[in-house]
Amino acid sequence: MTRPLILLRRRLVGSIFVLLIVIIGSFLLLEAAPGDAVDAYIVSTGGDAGMIELLRHRWGLDQSELTRLANYLWALLHLDLGHSVTFSRPIREIILERLPTTLILMGSATALSFGLGSALGIYAGARPGSFRDRFLSIGSLALYAVPGFWLGLVLIVIFAVDLRWLPIGGIESLASDKTGLARTADIATHLVLPVSALGFIYLALYLRMMRAGMAEAWRQDFVLAARSRGLSRRRIVLAHVARNALLPLVTMLGLQSAQMLGGSVVIESVFAVPGLGRLAQEAVAGRDTPLLLGIILTSAVLVIVINLVVDLAYAFLDPRVGASEAGA
Amino acid sequence: MSNVTISRRAVLAGSAALLASTAMPDIGWAQTLKKGGRLVVAADSEPRNLNPAIVASNGVFFISSKVVETLAEASFDGKDGLQPRLALSWEGAADGLSVTFKLRDGVRWHDGKPFTSADVAFSALQVWKPLQNLGRTVFKDLAAVDTPDDLTAVFKFAKPTPFQLIRNALPALSSVVPKHIYETGKIEENPANNAPVGTGPFKFAEYKAGQYYRLAKNTDYWGKDEPWLDEIVYQVLPDRTSAAAALEAEEIQLAAFSAVPLADLDRISKVPGLKVITKGYEGLTYQLVVEINHRRKELSDLKVRQAIAHAIDKDFVVKTVFLGYAATATGPVPKNDPQFYTADVPTYAFDVAKANALLDEAGYKKGSDGNRFSLKLLPAPYFNETKQFGDYLRQALAAIGIDAELVNNDSPAHIKAVYTDHAFDLAVGPPVFRGDPAISTTILVQSGIPDGVPFSNQGGYKNEELDALIAKASETLDTAARTELYKEFQKKVATDLPLINVAEWSFISVARDTVSNIANNPRWAVSNWADTYLAG
């Protein structure tokens, strides 16, 4: 068997256990939170004892926790995510509706932070200790320290309220009947601010990692060797120093995907983007256990898949990875 | 025209004139009437069920009241505070056993079928009485609805029911849904609950979860020349800070229900082209109340409750917590209620010395640390103001030697802690006054309510005299006598303090100057907006 395939098989077996632990853990955590979906619902309606009892019965909340967990797992085995009580719709439908939005937002933000972050990192790492290196390092650190919602609000005030260059929120113009390219452009315009807010925060990580890796690489013997061979500085920076510093960034990319999902909860609320993050917040506020479990499950699968892809890429980039497993 | 605009801006700078500005659009300067256009409104939540006949709540009405109409709507100047909608007239029998509604002729449902008395009978018997959060109480004795002809509906009650109560309940509780759509299958699971069909000036057109609701003009509406707008779009803006920004960026034209936080109003009122409106919510009054757990020995002592009432500086609360957008309260009926309110009740002036004396008298002396006793204080998290008042109350109690520990929960956890588990000593709640004390006010102090019922007396308070008074009022048919009983009720509550009413407030709208005919009835935000227009 080839190396990547063995890696894939091992990861998949492990993933199933991870998912099971995630589900049961989340379920227990949610049950520990005081109040249930009916309590959340009657906040806005009120109601008498009979109505409340009826709702609990209809929503299946009069059953014991264990029965509900068992029912959920059994349904899940049949690939059924269940029914959301806060939206009174099938959960699969709701999640599939929101997933693309979150994927676009996360993907663009990751591309922005990875692309711009590593490019600036190379720029800073080309001359460690120079003015531009210090300026970029401190600047990116300052951005990293800024809370996401605040950065979002500042961007809104500047670019949407004062300058009116960009829309203030949402994923596309309201009820506009746009199609094709016009719609794509419309969505892209709406994504500029949320993607910037989300991407700029994580930019610092890539920048600093790239810069640190390069500063390290400059001291290596192969750089000296490259120099002695009379290679141009440009070539040394890009092909030798930066390339060697790139590997840890790929690992980081996988790890960051989980962080990004967390960050999108806040950013999606600030920019009124109808994605998974905001849905998760609504599910917690509504004590909609099956919906939240569905979201967590989707996110977990997403993170596992991304990390798998990263590992495969890693195995491809670095021949040492997986070599021991192939030999075993 | 430009002169007028400048002078208005100058006027707006003074906050006293803020209130007056709401009356000005009609008289101050002539705005040209313009038909058509899209009104974009901020919405902060997406109700799971949009059927106002099942869920009579402001969140649902905000959207659905434009689609599904009630028998009557609240009015500033109409008889008994009502104006006709689907019903033209209503008459109660002297024995309290029947109410006759004459219905509007020529009304059609959005799908073209005619509206008749059968729809009213179906809504009342199959929806309001068994399923509606408020109707289950008010219409509990409704036995039958006779329909002698297509335009007459006679409500028959098994027990005498005060006509005044039914009348007062009409604006919120009488949404009529189409029988032909709801008669097959389970009413709670009908798809029309998420895409309502009604007789209103706007048809439900589209809902994109997490993004917007769109209502389109009903060209077949019974109101002459109405509606004025082509469509209404509710943009879902979950973040409270974004409504103000969206108004400034001209992406939305109206933010109702205080979507713009009070703290931002001063700034936003100075933005050219925006107006702050405090009218149009008179029929939706919220009351800031200290709920008391009478199971606590100390709190079951009237002197202690009086001391707490004296320790609260209501004027300060109105000024600081509500930034002036509220009124101090005297009892369980708000001052702005035209029918029931009486000022003739015991009042508790802000007096720390007196409060301390009362506590000494009650036998709770200050300990060496300056504390008499400690208790748990749970402010409801639904409004910024209830949370802020919780912080204030903690300090006010500290001044009289009561050490209050603040317990902050999110909404479902708060509901469970207070109304099911009774795990509180004091709680801060915002009950709603709905135009008649019998709808949702008397249950705040009445005994014998099962555990778990929200916004009711879960503090273990029991006063047989008060219970008897509430029971008597619920079956008193004569309007004057019934009103008198509720005045007595206010007096008794203010005397015995089963809970402490601190302030009364309602919501605030912020809109662009072009949005016209705003706030022209006491429940404007949840009325049908048939005559709302965008001035050119």
Image (cartoon, coloured by chain):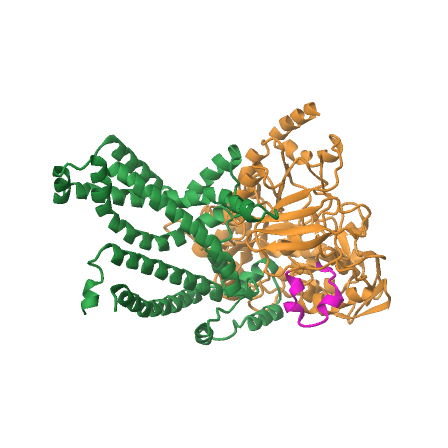
Chain colours: A green, B orange
Residue name at image x 65 percent, y 53 percent: B63
In this rendered view, identify the residue nearer to me: A200 or B13.
Answer: A200
In this rendered view, identify the residue nearer to me: B461 or A28.
Answer: A28
The furthest residue to the right: B149
Residue B183 quadrant? bottom right
Specify whether residue B183 is painted magenta: yes
Q: Quadrant of the C terminus of chain B?
A: top right
Left or right of A308 in this view: B101: right
Specify whether residue B234 is painted magenta: no
In this rendered view, identify the residue nearer to me: A316 or B352.
Answer: A316
Give the tally of numbered discs.
0
Residue A203 is situated, as x and y percent measured from the top left of the image, at 34, 43
Q: Is residue B259 visible?
A: yes
Residue name at image x 49 percent, y 46 percent: A271
Residue name at image x 56 percent, y 63 percent: B458
Q: Quadrant of the N terminus of chain B?
A: top right
Residue B496 is situated, as x and y percent measured from the top left of the image, at 61, 57
Residue B123 is situated, as x and y percent measured from the top left of the image, at 74, 65
Q: Is residue B365 visible?
A: no
Magenta stretch? B173-194
